[in-house]
Image (spheres, grey):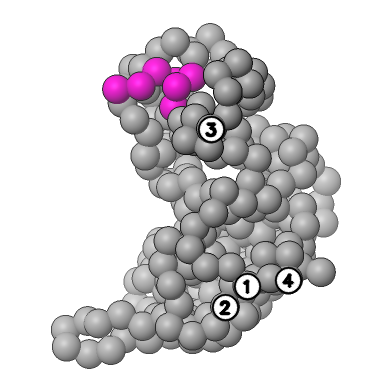
C-alpha cells in the first residue's frame, strides 16, 4: 500500500479572465520510506501539487490518501518545508525547533530532548541559543528541516528547500539529506527545478509535463548512497531525466525552474 497517494488531482486558477487548468489529473503513489523527487517546466504546478498534498490548498477534483484513507486540510502527519524556512526571527534556534511541539502540548522537558536530538542530527547543537537572524541561509534551512523532523511526520514535503543556497552549501546539504533520510526512513516528496539535485536525492523521480500538467514519466534510481554529483552513473540518470524534460520545457517556452 502507498504511504501517500494522489488520485486524479485537478486544479484550476483564474488568469486574465480565463480559467487556467494547472494540474490535469495527477496520479502519483509514494511508498513508505520512498524519496520521490518531482521535476518539471517552469510554472507547471509542482509547488501547487505539493501544497495540495500538504493540505494547504484544495484540488478542484481528485483526492489525497494517506495510508489508504482520504485526507483534507493540514495535519501533523504531513509537514511542508518551504524554499525559505519561514522561521520566527524573534525566537532562538531551539525555540523554533520546539514550536510545533509546544503547540501540540508536549511537556517542556520532552520538547527539549526532541529538539536536541534533531539539532544534533543537523549539526546545529552549538547554535541552539542563537537567534535565527544570526544564521546563514544554509543554517536556517537546517533549522527548518530540524523543526519539521521534530514533529515526526509520516510524510515530509520539501518545496525547493535548497534553491536559494550557494553551490557549496547545497552540495553539503545534499549529502546530509541523504544520510538523514537513511536514518529516519521518512517518506519524502521533494520538489526541485534542479535535475542534478533530483538524481542525487531521489529513489524515484517524477517528471511533470508542461501545463496542464500530468506525470509524463517516473524513473527509479537504485544507485548506492551517499551519492555525489560527480558520479558518472548519476550523469547518465541526469541525461535520462533531461531527455524527458526538454520537450516539456520547449513547450513551456521557459527554463527549468518553478
Disc 4 designates what residue?
A: 68
Whole-angstrom CA distance, mark 2 to mark 1, is: 7 Å
Give the vertical position of 51 relative to 113 (above or below): below
Residue drawn at point x = 65 percent, y = 32 percent: 176
Q: Rounded to the nearest whole Å, what is the CA distance between mark 3 and mark 2?
A: 30 Å
Q: For the N terminus, which image quadrant?
A: bottom right
Residue drawn 77% across the image and 57% down it: 32
Instruction: Tell me which corner region of the image, top left, top right, bottom left or bottom right, holds residue 145.
Output: top right
Which residue has dot 2 on it?
63
Residue assigned mark 3: 105
Give the image location of residue 93, x and y in percent.
Answer: 44, 20
Tell me, yes or no, if residue 220 can be seen here. Answer: yes
**Dot placed on the residue nearer the N-terminal end, 3 or 2:** 2
Residue carrying label 1: 70
Residue 168 visible in the displayed image:
no
Q: Considering the numbered disc 2 on the image, is that residue within a helix, a strand or a loop?
A: strand
Element under disc 1: strand
Residue 116 falls in image quadrant? top right
Q: Residues within 10 Å of mark 1 (few under 14, many from 20)?
A: few
Give the side of residue 17 with respect to residue 34, left or right: left
Local secondary structure at mark 3? loop
Going from the N terminus, do you reach mark 2 or mark 1 first? 2
Residue count near mark 4 (Cα–Cα under 10 Å), binned few <14, some 14–19, many ≥20: few
* Residue bounds of the magenta highlight: 90-96
Which residue shows up at 47% across the image and 35% down it? Answer: 103
Amino acid at each position: 500500500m502507498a504511504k501517500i497517494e494522489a488520485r486524479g488531482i485537478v486544479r484550476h486558477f483564474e488568469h486574465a479572465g480565463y480559467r487556467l487548468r494547472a494540474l490535469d489529473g495527477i496520479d502519483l503513489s509514494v511508498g513508505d520510506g520512498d524519496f520521490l523527487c518531482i521535476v518539471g517546466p517552469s510554472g507547471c504546478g509542482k509547488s501547487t501539487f505539493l501544497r495540495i498534498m500538504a493540505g494547504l490548498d484544495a484540488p478542484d477534483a481528485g483526492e489525497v490518501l494517506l495510508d489508504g484513507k482520504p485526507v483534507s486540510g493540514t495535519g501533523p502527519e504531513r509537514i511542508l518545508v518551504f524554499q525559505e524556512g519561514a522561521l520566527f526571527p524573534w525566537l532562538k534556534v531551539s525555540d523554533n525547533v520546539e514550536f510545533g511541539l509546544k503547540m501540540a502540548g508536549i511537556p517542556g522537558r520532552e520538547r527539549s530532548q526532541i529538539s536536541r536530538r534533531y539539532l544534533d542530527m543537523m549539526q546545529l547543537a552549538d547554535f541552539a541559543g542563537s537567534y535565527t537572524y544570526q544564521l546563514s541561509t544554509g543554517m536556517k534551512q537546517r533549522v527548518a528541516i530540524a523543526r519539521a523532523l521534530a514533529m515526526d511526520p509520516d510524510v515530509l514535503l520539501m518545496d525547493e528547500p535548497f534553491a536559494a543556497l550557494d553551490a557549496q552549501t547545497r552540495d553539503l546539504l545534499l549529502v546530509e539529506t541523504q544520510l538523514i533520510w537513511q536514518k529516519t526512513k521518512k517518506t519524502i516528496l521533494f520538489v526541485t527545478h534542479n535535475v542534478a539535485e533530483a538524481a542525487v536525492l531521489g529513489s524515484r523521480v517524477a517528471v511533470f509535463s508542461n501545463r496542464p500538467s500530468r506525470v509524463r514519466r517516473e524513473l527509479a534510481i537504485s544507485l548506492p548512497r551517499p551519492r555525489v554529483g560527480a558520479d558518472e552513473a548519476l550523469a547518465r540518470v541526469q541525461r535520462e531525466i533531461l531527455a524527458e524534460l526538454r520537450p516539456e520545457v520547449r513547450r513551456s517556452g521557459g527554463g527549468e525552474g518553478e
